[in-house]
Amino acid sequence: MVSDGNTDDNTSSTTSDNILLKDISEKLPDTDTSDQENLTLYTDSDIAINEKAPSPSSKSHNLVILSIVAINTISTCFLVVLNKYIFSFPGLQSLQLSFTAWHVFCTFSILFIASLRPFQLFDRIYLNVQTVLPLSAAFTAWIILNNLSLALNPLGFYQIAKILTTPTVVILNYFIAGTTVSKTVIGSLGAICIGAGLTCKGSTDTELLGALVATAAFITTALYQIWIGTKQEGVNSAQLLFNQSYVSLGMLTIIIPFTDRQQLAASTIGVDGGEILDVRVWVAIALSGVMAMVVNLTQFLIIGKTSAVTFNVASHLKTAIILVAGWVLQAKGFNWVELLGILIAVSGAVVYSFDT
């Protein structure tokens, strides 16, 4: 009988397959019928879903970020209220840079103590001054301009102007890194600007100087936030902030004699308008330094662990809270145009943050 030429090949292939299957079955654990009936067939979609499921470490990370954002929000609200109270005294309003230096000094001192035993919350290192100098200059300008904006503008206008930091970050990123944005982002940025414009229109107490200072403040803030993210390479948030703080303190020490010397010479420490400052003012000054340190560190942590966009989301939450506080503390009612502007601006900023 003449056989097919492929028979040997097929037989050989079948035999090898049977041997392979037998070898695999011998290595598998024994299962009864009920176990086999309970076996589940997983599809590619099931695997993809499982891969996207958040791990316990991811949930823990998100909880840490949420806690940091909450601390930043609370400390910022306290700092704004404290500064507004401090600068309500005429003799202290002209000492903007001195208070800035006080805040920077508190930041440096608390971080320095935190790096010592028995705390040792982080490893203290000293970076090249040339590396930290641009960031320190932006940091100093950021605090100075925001303090001036808070002193020259109503509380509501001060916070609404800060919302413009979000689109400014996008614009600067486009010119610096060539980063483009989607149509959704453009629409959300338009909503932010419209909302801010409606609210600013309702703030009749704002003068040209205050508006110019507020504009310079949010532009500097956007640039500073971008640099915070780019500088945190090889160092953690506390290490970078520590180096920035003592360099900024040195810069302010040089500037203050030329700006605050006349005001300091014209007044006596602890005296405002011929009256000794109440102990509550000194407590507010001390607390403002602590709150400034907390705000600075949590800002670095948020941007370092996430992005400047996430930090802006927290800023929008702070804006809404502080605006309400401003209405209550100043005993002024709000009109519906201002309320509508706040809702549009904050909503647009949140949409932008989530879309990106």
Image (tube, rainbow, N blue to C red):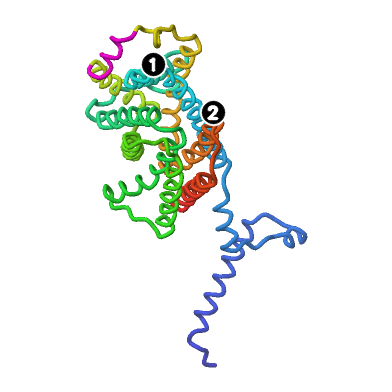
Judged from this view, the residue extending furthest toward the bottom is 1
> Along the line of sight, which residue is nearer the eye, 268 or 222?
268
Q: Residues within 10 Å of mark 2 (few under 14, many from 20)?
A: few
Location of mark 1 (residue) = 109
- Residues in magenta? 258-267
Q: In the image, is residue 173 above or below residue 257?
A: below
Secondary element under disc 1, as helix, strand or loop, is: helix
Q: Position of residue 70 (x, y in %)?
A: 54, 33
Structural distance between the alpha carbons of marks 2 and 1: 32 Å
Q: Is residue 22 visible?
A: yes
Q: Position of residue 105 (x, y in %)?
A: 36, 17
68 inside magenta stretch: no
Q: In the image, is residue 301 above or below residue 265?
A: below
Q: Residue at x 50, y 12 (%)?
A: 280
Secondary element under disc 2, as helix, strand or loop, is: helix
Q: Position of residue 196 (x, y in %)?
A: 43, 46
263 inside magenta stretch: yes
Q: Residue at x 44, y 33 (%)?
A: 154
Judged from this view, the residue extending furthest toward the front is 204
Q: Quadrant of the N terminus?
A: bottom right
Q: Position of residue 331 (x, y in %)?
A: 55, 30
Please identify the quarter of the rendering in which residue 98 is found: top left
Q: Is residue 233 visible?
A: no
Q: Residue at x 37, y 31 (%)?
A: 149
**Which amino acid lies under the numbered mark 2 shown in the image of this protein?**
Leu
Q: Is residue 97 left or right of residue 5?
A: left
**Which amino acid lies under the numbered mark 1 shown in the image of this protein?**
Ser
Q: In the image, is residue 244 above or below residue 223?
A: above
Location of mark 2 (residue) = 329
Badge nearest the viewer, 2 or 1? 2
